[in-house]
Amino acid sequence: MGLNDIAWETLFARHNILDEIAKAGMFRITADQIKTEREPRLMTKFDHRVNLPAIFQDNHLAILPVTRGDYVISRFSAYHDFEECALECQRIHLPSGIQSLLPQYIISEAIALNCANACGILEDFLEDENLIPTVSGRMSSGEFRFHISTDGTQQTVDVRNSQIEIDAAYEGRSCLALFEAKRDISNDFLVRQLYYPFRVWLGRVTKKIKPVFLVFSNGVFYLYQYEFTDPQNYNSLSLVKQKNYILSPEITLADIQAIVENTPICSEPKVAFPQADSMERIINLMEMLSEKDMTRQDITNRYIFQDRQTNYYTTAGNYLGLIEQGEKRSDGLTYFSLSDTGRRIMKMPYRERQIAIATAILRHRAFHETLKLHLQCGEMPNTNTIVQIMQSCGIYNVVASETFKRRASTIRSWLEWILGLIESE
C-alpha cells in the first residue's frame, strides 16, 4: 500500500468521510486537514483513475478542488476515457534550419507544444490562421457553478477562486484553443483539466473556446478537440475531432528491407514472449526511463497501467534487450532502468532511433520471418501462419495453442508499427 493510500485511509476514518458522503452526497475537506497526514499537492493530484488511492477506487470516489484550500469528495464521474485513436498519421516536417526542436530534445510538454506550433500542426488541426500564443500557467478560476454526474444523479458544485493551470492557449481569428498536454500515453484523463479553464475563459472572450488535449510521444502528436455541449455540465464533454501527426523519420521501404536482409538473428531469450501489443507504449515507457529509473509502482502510477499491464510492458522491453530490472536497492525497492543498448538508442537522432528499435525487434526470428513473408507476399500473414512460424522458432515457455494465437497479435502489431514508419514514395 502506498503512502497516499495509508494517509487517505487515516483521514477517511478520522472524519467519517464515507458516512458523511452517504448523508450529504459529498464531503468537503480542507488542505489543512489533509496536511495533518501528508502534503496536499501529493494527496490530491490524480490525473487518471488508476492514480486514485485504494479507498477512492473501492468506493467509486473522486476529488475536485473548489477553492485554493478546499476540496470536495463524492462519487463524481470525474474522468473521461480517450476515444479510439485514428490509425492514420499525417506526416509533417520541422521548418528548415530549426535545430533545437528535434524529437530527441522534446523533453517537456511545453517544448512539444512549441514544436507542434512550429510545424504547422496547430493551424491545420484548429483550422484557424495567425495563431498567437497567449495565456498559460497558473491562475485563479474566479467563481462559477457546474453540475456533475454523481452515482446516477446530478450534484451542484460551486467553485470560488480555485487554482487552475493552462499548459498553453493559442488565439486565432475565430477561436481560442486551450491546451492540456502530456507526454504519457494513457487511457483516460481528468475532465477538470479541460473544464475549469474552459469555464474561466468562456466568460472572458467572445470567440469560440476549443478545449484540446495533446499527447506527444516518440515523434507523434495525438490531438483531441472536445466541446462542452452544455457549458454548465461537467460531463457534457464530446469529441469534435481527433487527428495524429508524425515527424517524418524519412524511412523508406528499402531501409526496412535492408534491416530484414542484414540483421543477424539472436538466440531466443529465456524471457516470456511479449504480450504487449502497443510498440508506442513500450517506446513511451523507454522515454520515461531515460529520465530516471522507476519502480514497478512508479510505472503503474505514472504510466496509467494496471499492475498486470506493467508486467507485460516491462517484460516486452526486457525481451528486446532494452529494459532491465536491477537488484533491490538500499530503500528495499527494485527498479527498472534502460539497458545500455536502450540508453544508447534513446540518445540517437530520431530516424536512427526508429531504425534501431526496428532492428531490435527483427533480431528475433518470429518477427523476422513474419515480416520477410509479408514483404514477399504483399500482405500480413494470417494468425495461423504466424503461429506456425512461432512454433518453429523455439519460443520460450509457450505451449497452448490459444497462447500462441494471443502472442501472434503482438507480432502483427509490432510489425505494423515498423511498416508504419515507411514514408510513401
Image (tube, rainbow, N blue to C red):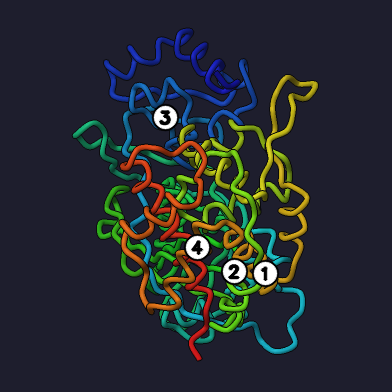
Image point (52%, 83%), residue name: 423
* Residue at the front extreme of this rendering: 392
Distance CA(mark 1)–CA(mark 3) = 40 Å
Query: In this figure, which residue is indicated by the disc labeled 4?
Result: 214
Q: Is residue 332 above or below residue 148?
A: above
Q: Secondary structure at mark 3?
A: strand
* Dot label at residue 219: 2
Distance CA(mark 2)–CA(mark 3) = 38 Å
Foreground mark, 1 or 3?
1
Q: Secondary structure at mark 2?
A: loop
User: Which image quarter: residue 117?
Assistant: bottom right
Q: Where does the image place residue 307, in percent across and percent down from the top left?
A: 49, 32
Tag 2 and tag 1, C-beta contact below 8 Å: yes
Q: Secondary structure at mark 1?
A: helix
Task: Please name the amino acid that badge 2 sits on.
Answer: Gly
Q: Secondary structure at mark 4?
A: strand
Q: Residues within 10 Å of mark 3 (few under 14, many from 20)?
A: some
Residue 83 vs residue 168, the one in the foreground: 83
Residue 393 vs residue 297, the one in the foreground: 393
Query: In this figure, which residue is indicated by the disc labeled 1?
Result: 103
